[in-house]
Amino acid sequence: MKAVIFKETGKYAVVEKPVPEIKKANELLVKVEACSICGSDMHILSDPPGYPAKPGTTIGHEMVGTIVGMGSEVTAFAVGDRIVCDNNIPCGQCYYCRSGHANMCEHVRCLGVNGDGFFAQYALIPDTSAYAISPDLPLDIAIFAEPLNCVMGAMDKLRMIPGETVVVVGAGPIGLYFIQLLKKNGAGTVIAAEPSEFRRRMAKEVGADIVVSPAEAEKLPQIAAVGADIVVDAVGICIKDALDWVRSSGRVLLFGQNFARTQEICQSVITRKELTVTGSYIGSYSWHDTIRLLEHDPMQLEKMITHRLTLEDFAVGYDAMKDGSALEVILYPNGGRC
Ligand SMILES: [Zn+2]
Ligand SMILES: [Zn+2]
C-alpha cells in the first residue's frame, strides 16, 4: 500500500509499505477513506521539529475509515462499519487515566507521531480508539471529527452564557472551529482578530460578526469600552492581547500551542482584573458529542476545504499548508472524491 512517512528531520516520503496485519485481539484493520493534514503534521515536518516523530513512521492522525478486518475480541464493531479515530491512545493505568484526565496520560501513544498513522491506504487501530459514525454522514464532514473534538473539549470548559461577546485570536482552522461553535452556542458578538486577509474573509464566511486585524482590535467599541467577556487564543502566543482585551472578571481560554515562543506578561493584570485563565489540551471525552453534532449540523465546515487530493499528491497539500493558502486539505488514499 502507499503511505506518507516521516523520513528524517524536515523530510517526508511517499513510499510503498505492506498492508499492516492484525496482531492483537482488540485491533481493527481500517481502510482509510479520507485523511487530512493538520498543523501538528506540519510541526512534525518542520526543522527543528515541533513534535519528535520516529523516522519511518506513517504520519497523519485525522481520518475516516471503513473496518475491513478485526481481532477476535472485538465486540463493539463489525466489518463494514464506518469510523473515526482518537489517535491519542492513553495507557489506561496512570494517575491521570484513572482520574478522568486521559488527555494528560503520562504514557500516551500518538498514532501518526510515535505509532503508524493514517496517511496510508490501510491502518491498524485499537477498538477503544474508534468511534462509529452514521453511514449517512458525508466523508467531507466526518473528516472534521478529530480537530473539532479538540475544540469541543475547550467549549465544555468555557461554559459560555448566550449573548456573551467573544474575541477569537487567530482564524486558522482552530479559530474557525471556535467561531462556528461559539455562534452555535449563542454567543452575542464573535470578533475574529487575524492578520491574514484570506483568513479574515473565511472567518466572516463561517459566522464571525466582526473581523479585524489584531492591530485594529483594541479600537473596537466592544473592546475599548468594557472589554470582551471571553478571549480565546487559538494561536498560542497571544496571551498579552488576551489579557488586554478581556473585561474585568472575564475569561481567557488558551488553546493554541507554541513551545518555541515565550511571552512576557504582567501577572498583576490577572489579579487586578480578577480573570479566569484556562488552558485546554485535546479533548478525550467529547467524541460522542462531536459526532452527534456533525450528524445533526455540518455548520459551515465544508467551506473550509481548500484542497481535495490523492495521497500521491501529498506535496501539493503540504506546500499549500506551508504557504498559508490552505485551510483544510483532504487526501483520499483509496481514490474517491478528489
Ligand atoms: Zn490534528
Ligand atoms: Zn495513562
Image: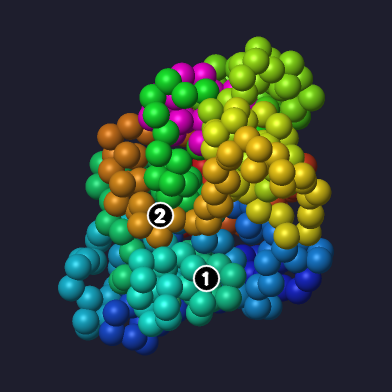
Residue 224 coordinates in the image, percent (x, y): 69, 17
Tell me if mark 2 has few (under 14), some (14-19) or many (20+) residues whose alpha carbon lies within 10 angstroms of its own: many
Residue 293 spot, x, y in % from top left:
32, 39
* Numbered tag placed on residue 64 in the rendering: 2
Q: Is residue 204 above or below residue 21?
A: above
Q: At x 75% / y 66%, what residue is drawn?
A: 49
Residue 320 shows in this picture: no
Is residue 8 shown above or below 249?
Answer: below
Task: Give the residue number, with chain letter if any, for mark 1.
Answer: 110
Q: Which residues are magenta?
A: 178-192
**How many numbered badges does the structure rendering display?**
2
Confirm or deny contact between disc 2 and disc 1 (CB under 8 A). Answer: no
Q: Is residue 5 magenta?
A: no
The residue depicted at 72 percent of the width and 47 percent of the height is 267
Q: Residue at x 42, y 78 (%)?
A: 95
Position of residue 303 in the picture relative to residue 46 (left or right): left
SS state under label 1:
strand
Query: Does residue 23 appear to the left or right of 258 in the view shown?
Result: left
Along the viewing direction, whichever of 83 and 239 lies nearer the viewer:
239
Q: Please name the amino acid that badge 1 sits on.
A: Cys
The CA span between labels 2 and 1 is 17 Å
Compare residues 323 and 293 and report the one nearer the observer: 293
Q: Amino acid at mark 2?
A: Val
Answer with the quarter of the image where residue 252 lies.
top right
Q: Quadrant of residue 209?
A: top right
Name the residue at 43% across, 73% down.
96
The correct choice, above or below, for 195 with respect to 252 in the image is above
Q: Does residue 228 appear in the picture of this structure? A: yes
**Residue lying at the far front of the rendered structure:** 272
